[in-house]
């Protein structure tokens, strides 16, 4: 029996609906992006764990939620109160993990001693191949954290902060840029690479927001200026 004209129309409509439904159900994999939108921003680009700076608007909103306060005293501070670098398994410590994450073609011994690779220092745009020419920078320096609230933390909280591989807190950078930065906040030190300012400020705000650390008035102004480049 030949189907009626109406029957053909129904079949065509059903087929079309099936195609459209299938097209709308494609899986889209989400890749970690802006540091302000997720807790993990690390993608192996060879230039650190940075967020890419796409979340300037979110970072500005987060910055406005931070407590503004005068920097606290450095009394009682020592780097030893922020235990690092801790073991991360398979013979690697936190430094090793960051070097592996941020580098390309990284080679290591069986006990995780990094022997070779290539790294791009995002602070000053230097390309490096000697692991010993790199420091692991704390985005928010340990002493800066102490002055903005970490003095009241437990030793365990400070250890977590010093070895945080989840937030955009640890970066492989050139020795020169890390030592130039020291424990300064953005009111007195910014990366020489202006193109990195958006990412730098976004990541700084992300870390301070997560750990509920305060900012000074000058620091907040500097961060606002940097976020204006996003």
Image (cartoon, rainbow, N blue to C red):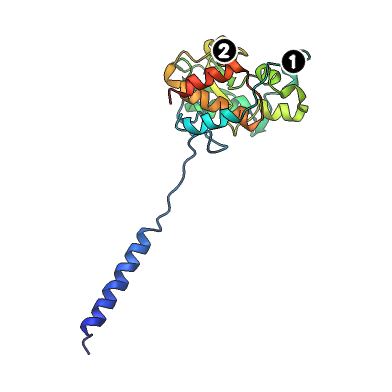
Q: Residue at x 34, y 67 (%)?
A: 18
Which of 108/189 is in front? Answer: 189
Q: Name the residue under label 1.
A: 78
What is the x, y in percent for residue 116?
50, 22
Left or right, residue 30 beside residue 143:
left
Left or right, residue 130 beside residue 81:
left
Q: Quadrant of the N terminus?
A: bottom left
Residue 112 visible in rendering? no
* Mark toward the start of the polypeptide (2 vs 1): 1
Disc 2 to disc 1, C-alpha distance: 18 Å
User: In this picture, is 198 found above or below 19?
Assistant: above
Crowdedness of circle 2 by 10 Å Cα count: few (<14), some, many (20+)? some
Left or right, residue 23 beside residue 226:
left
What is the x, y in percent for residue 192?
46, 13
Which of 194/230 is in front? Answer: 230
Q: Name the quadrant containing residue 163.
A: top right
Q: Mark 2 points at which residue?
A: 181
User: In this picture, is 98 found above or below 180?
Assistant: below
């Amino acid at each position: 029996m030949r189907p009626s004209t109406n029957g053909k129309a129904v079949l065509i409509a059903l087929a079309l609906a099936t195609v459209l439904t299938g097209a709308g159900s494609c899986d889209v994999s989400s890749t970690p992006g802006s540091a302000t939108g997720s807790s993990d921003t690390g993608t192996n680009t060879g230039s650190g764990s940075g967020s890419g700076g796409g979340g300037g608007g979110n970072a500005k909103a987060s910055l406005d939620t931070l407590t503004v306060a005068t920097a606290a005293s450095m009394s009682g501070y020592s780097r030893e109160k922020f235990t690092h670098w801790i073991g991360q398994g398979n013979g690697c410590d936190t430094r090793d993990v960051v070097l592996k994450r941020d580098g390309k073609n990284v080679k290591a011994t069986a006990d995780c001693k990094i022997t070779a690779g290539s790294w791009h220092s995002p602070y000053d745009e230097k390309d490096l191949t000697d692991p010993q020419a790199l420091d692991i920078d704390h985005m928010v320096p340990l002493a800066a954290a102490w002055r903005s609230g970490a003095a009241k933390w437990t030793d365990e909280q400070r250890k977590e902060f010093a070895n945080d591989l989840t937030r955009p807190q640890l970066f492989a950078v050139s020795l020169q840029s890390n030592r130039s930065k020291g424990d300064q906040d953005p009111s007195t030190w910014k990366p020489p690479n202006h193109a990195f300012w958006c990412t730098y400020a976004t990541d700084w705000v992300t870390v301070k927001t997560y750990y509920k650390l305060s900012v000074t008035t000058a620091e907040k102004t500097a961060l606002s200026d940097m976020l204006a480049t996003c």
